[in-house]
Image (cartoon, grey):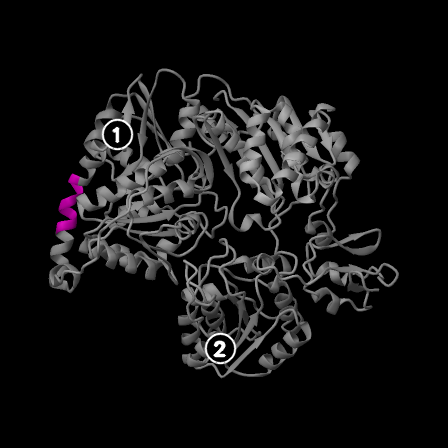
Amino acid sequence: MGQKYLLGNEAIAHGCVESGVDFVSGYPGTPSSEVIDVLRVQPDRSYYIEWSVNEKVALENALAASWCGIRSLCTMKHVGLNVAADPLMTSAYTGITGGLVIMSADDPFAHSSQNEQDTRCYAHFARVPCLDPATLQEAHDMISEAFALSEELGLPVIFRPTTRICHSKGDVDIGEKVTSSRKGEFHKDPRQYVVIPAHTRILHKKLNEKQSAIRKRLVERGFNTYTILGKTAIIASGIGATYVQELLPEGISFMKIGAYPIDEEWLGDFVKKHEKVLVIEELAPEVEEAVRQVAGGVPIFGKKNGYAPYEGELSPTAVAAIMDKAGFLNKKLEIPEDPVPNLPPRPPILCAGCLHRGTFYAIKKVFRDAIYPSDIGCYTLGLQLGVVDTTICMGASITVASGIYHAGDPRDIICTIGDSTFLHTGIQGLINAVYNGANITVVILDNRITAMTGHQPNPNTGVTACGVESPPVSLDALCRACGVSFVESIDPYDITGMITVLQEAKKRKGVKVIIAKQMCVITARRAGVKRGKYMVSTDICTGCQTCVRFGCPAIEFTDEKARINELCSGCAVCVQLCPVGAIVREGKK
Amino acid sequence: MSESFDILIVGIGGQGTILASNILGEACLLEGRHVKGAETHGMAQRGGSVESHIRINGLFGPLIPPGHADLLISFDLLEALRYSHYVKKGGKMVVNRQLVLPTSVFMQNLVVPSQEEIIAALKKHSLCLLDADKIAEEAGSPLSQNVVMLGAASLSIPLKPESLLEAVKSLVPKKTVEINANAFEMGRDFGRTC
């Protein structure tokens, strides 16, 4: 069909459409989200598509669809695969019928994540194939390969791009869209789909017997390749291979790994033809361990002997430094200048007018010496406001709060969790806290959307991934059904009201839930909500900086006075904070 | 390193760096050139420091190594200084004369260099400094600042101005095509004076 300038995730989405995908599910997570965001807005869509409530739910749905003989895609970020690990491990036993591709996007350097885990380890653990693209074109082309491979082997195939694939851009050759005519049909086969011990023992043996065929097939299909040019060699995988190719001096052999598991015999033949071998890959030493197993006496350079780092992401500069250290670069590195030191940082910050800032302000006001467990979302940025004490993984705010309470800490505990995160894995923690008699306050930060990953709808929004109306979940009724008797909904732009409700919650025993409900300021702007702007009346401003400490990017402080800049979205929370009434609506004095 | 022409676009999340990089990418395609790039998505966008790498004729990875950018386009003075070590010897800088102070400066009482100090530090490179907001307003909308910046930078970019202009027209909202075409030409006119 021709060439297009595409984001990696757009190229991946296009690969799915060209493969005639029938069923798509997933949970948003940077850097994976745009694949479904692109697929869900295609006008002439012939596939079913959903945002699921979490990754386990998404994968079980996709697995069932593939059991019915249709091609299914399930997308998530690397840590989402932890949530989906339960169905993943056993889906390798049951196998699949229609192709099942699980896209789990890794995030080396944790640009937008809580850790730097490596999806390839899960593939190894589950004993399923894993494809690891090095370029956008490969990412696009690998999707149709992944579906074909999945069907040929009868196994789910994991597709593992990284941030620098998902969020890089380039010219990509794309093909024609394919409209599938497959209809799903479930054929009962308890020996395959009911994993009671008697069945699962046999299924496990079958999975193990497939392994050697998988290894051979991945080499035959050309995912793993090499060229022999000399007595020394570099083996690289994923985007690391692209950086190596940019720097590779003449006369050095090169092996590129794009799929796992790696065939040992094939790998051993290559390694043994060389006098020394350097392995370059991001995150876990997955390739390096395979290389070391077949190396015999050939010296191997990599993470395990300190030539390459285990953590962070690779870059041309990092790869050049590794090659230099291991003696694989024949010219000296040009060391560029250092960055200018001591510049004030500009980290991401809650937007001007973000509902969470008002909520955090009120929490800090009422619960002064409390413990503040929090969760994963834009509101993790509340760290800058001193109201986030813990963040581990999705849903771990309420559970950490009840754990700290039962550990015996006498301080007040008040935790924060977003609406999407609450529906993802927060509900069980709430039921558990009520059931076991915790004494905590839970604030659900309800902006009715999954904001951080790009404003995807969730069951609280009232629309599906495709924009079809659906009944929004009642968080209030849900919390009451979990056994919470104190459930209050409040607009966090109303600071006085927010403070009153928090004070009431503080007085009571047991689990209290406050739902702080207001539209995400970005969604509101897109929906055309205009609240007008505010300004500081400099005659009245005393320069006390109460508003500055609120931390809104619309409030500056120059010449001993506060000033409101053009970022103001009109939430008017600062108006309520100013002790002298110096903040007024623009145009009114 | 490959023989690509490397452009780093930096600014603050929300200023339109991604649109600027898309225009460059599209223009490359119009000229049948390869192009690679990388950008900031997700939470990091929320008012934080953002960067877009574009490698015209790029065949390998999307990242520009520090010390290798042929051109730095910055929407903010402080961000220009933060990324100035990416510019190679003899490289160019096109910088908007605007200094948005990070909220951290007010919250933590940090010292921030003055406009004059920043400009003096940037001058060791070939610097084109412009008031993109004023030019954008003259062109018809303050929202066209990013296209003004591209116009000013276009004299240093190895792509035909016609390709860039065509890419601008195909990527901006339909209602604003005329304004943005103006913004590009006015930016380019200013670039000639640098």
Q: Is residue A370 above or below residue B165?
A: below
Label 1: which secondary element: loop
- Label 2: state its secondary structure: helix
Q: What residue sits right under mark 1 in the picture? A: A295
> Looking at the magenta stretch, what is its main secondary structure?
helix
Question: At 70% from the left edge and 44% from the top edge, which residue is drawn?
Answer: B142
Q: State which chain disc 2 sits on.
A: A
At horizontal 56% and vertical 60% (from top left) the residue drawn is A379
- On the image, the x and y values in percent for residue A363 come to 62, 70
Q: CA distance from mark 1 to mark 2?
A: 61 Å
Judging depth in this view, the residue of B186 and A545 nearest the camera is B186
Instruction: Write down the chain letter for disc 1.
Output: A
Residue A516: quadrant of the picture: bottom right
Q: Position of residue A285 (x, y in %)?
A: 35, 39
Q: Is residue A209 magenta?
A: yes
Q: Nearer the viewer, residue A553 or A414?
A: A553
Q: Position of residue A403 (x, y in %)?
A: 46, 70
Image quarter of residue A560: bottom right
Residue at 61% over, 48% down: A347
Q: Nearer the viewer, residue B19 or B163?
A: B163
Q: Which residues are magenta?
A: A206-213
Which residue does the numbered mark 2 point to in the structure image?
A476
Image quadrant containing the C terminus of chain A: bottom right
Query: Is residue A403 shown to the viewer in this render?
Result: yes
Of tags 1 and 2, the one toward the viewer is 2
B134 with respect to A415 (left or right): right
Count of number-bearing discs: 2
The amino acid pointed to by label 2 is Asp
